[in-house]
Amino acid sequence: MRAHHDLGGRPAGAIDRTERELEPWEKRVDAIFQLLAAPERRILRVDELRRAIEGLGGEEYDRLGYYECWIAAMVNLLLEKGVLTIDELGRKLDEVRLREQGVS
């Protein structure tokens, strides 16, 4: 039985092959992973990222875009490894929400 992420050989419909410039946030996601995976840190590894992406679950995996899957997987890994706590993550998300609303 195939897992939800194993799409090989399944009808995919039309594939958009046009090149596009990555959005700034997508570039930041890649840069964050590169920093976390750098040899001097080795906090995350590419095989862990792949496992975490594949472990997102079918609904979330299908709903999220490519780099959104990366972010979700990295957060899950950092929580799993104890690098971040749920409380720290929640506080930071609250800060970002307030900043986006123009509240300091």
Image (cartoon, rainbow, N blue to C red):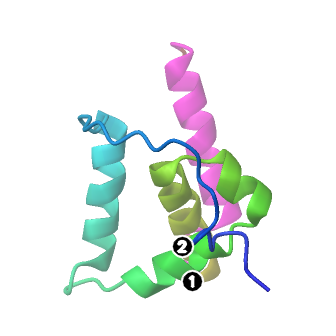
Q: Badge 2 local density, few (<14 within 10 Å), some, or many (20+)? A: some
Amino acid carrying mark 2 in the image: Leu
**Which residue is labeled 1 in the image?**
81
Q: Quadrant of residue 76?
A: bottom right
Mark 2 → mark 1, Cα distance in angstroms: 5 Å
Can the viewer see residue 44?
Answer: no
Q: Are marks 2 and 1 in contact (CB under 8 Å)?
A: yes
Of 101 and 52, the residue lying toward us: 52
Amino acid carrying mark 1 in the image: Lys
Where's residue 3, x and y in %?
Answer: 73, 78
Secondary structure beneath dot 1 equals loop
- Name the residue located 74 percent from the left edge and 81 percent from the top edge: 2
Where's residue 84, x and y in %?
Answer: 56, 69
Q: Would you place residue 98 above or below residue 2 in this image?
A: above
**Which residue is labeled 2 in the image?**
78
Magenta part of the chain: 81-102
